[in-house]
Image: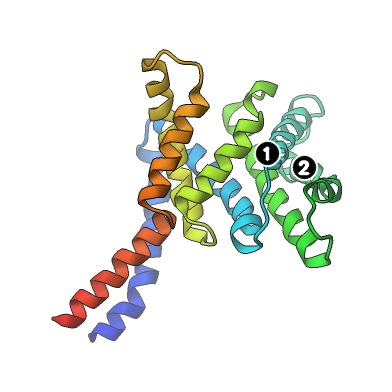
Amino acid sequence: MTSAHVQRLAPPALLLLLIAALAAVPLRATDFHLFQFTNILVYALALTGLNLLVGYNGQISLGHGAFYAVGAFGTALLVEHAGVPHWLALPAGAVIAIRDHPIAARTMGIDTVRYKAAVFGLSALLVGLAGGLSALAMRYAAPGMYGLFLSFGLLIGIALGGLGTLSGALYGAVCLQGIFLVVGKSAGALHTRNTPLVYGVVLVLFLVLFPNGIAGLLRSAAAWWRRWRGRG
């Protein structure tokens, strides 16, 4: 088998391995680790939605935490008080989250050209779905969980993962989950309630070292590897 054949088969093979590994997680993981893994997938979905708006469309939004919150509360209310099945409540909660998106778009100063509105709506839909999934996974939703800091956290996630890349959403989700665990403990050790300051310091340090995010770092590493192999 030639190297060209190997290069063509490598991505599908890696994808199959990834799918197999993900399918095995519920069978092998503890309840705690399964919950952390679920959070990563939820964040990845939310970051994919925000990345469509910020990374691909060049808009900045500090209001997507609200779509996440509306998706979570909408799903929770439909399931708990209206008796709507989970599978039906989830998309309904997401639709509720984007119902008012034209108002949000005008507030942000976004040009109301059709394609920009469509991107904004799709972005809000994905973030709303993530919020609904979060509510179902946690079986709990409270107003204090969805403040402005959530919107900043989502922006931090796509910056860490890599703007304008689909893979960056997954990398950013893993980083967010790790940051929420590690930095939260660090803030406690520093005896401070100003946890956002600690998050900000971590973000600045990371972006100084890796301005293109993890996706950019991996692209640079892959390019270096190809050049190194070419010299051989």
Residue at 85% from the left image edge and 45% from the top image edge? 100
Q: Is residue 189 left or right of residue 114?
A: left
Name which quarter of the figure residue 177 lies in: top left
Q: Total marks drawn?
A: 2
The local secondary structure at tag 1 comes to helix
Residue neighbourhood size for the residue with mark 1, other residues' Cα within 10 Å, grouped as few (<14), some (14–19), many (≥20): many
Q: Is residue 74 left or right of residue 220?
A: right
Q: Is residue 192 left or right of residue 116?
A: left
Residue at 63% from the left image edge and 43% from the top image edge? 130
C-alpha distance separating marks 2 and 1: 7 Å
What's the residue type where badge 2 is placed? Ala
Residue 64 appearing in the image: yes
Mark 2 in CB contact with mark 1 (< 8 angstroms): yes
Name which quarter of the figure residue 178 lies in: top left
Q: Is residue 194 above or below residue 99?
A: above
Residue at 59% from the left image edge and 55% from the top image edge? 51
Residue at 83% from the left image edge and 65% from the top image edge? 113
The local secondary structure at tag 2 comes to helix
What's the residue type where badge 1 is placed? Tyr
Picture coordinates of residue 220, whole percent (x, y): 33, 66
Of the pair 131 and 211, the residue shown nearer to us: 211
* Quarter containing the N terminus: bottom left
Of the pair 141 and 172, the residue shown nearer to us: 172
* Quarter containing the C terminus: bottom left
Q: Which residue is mark 1?
A: 68
First along the sequence among labels 2 and 1: 1
Q: Which residue is mark 2?
A: 97
Of the pair 212 and 91, the residue shown nearer to us: 212
Picture coordinates of residue 80, whole percent (x, y): 74, 25
Which mark identifies residue 168?
none
Residue 36 appearing in the image: no
Picture coordinates of residue 117, whole percent (x, y): 79, 59
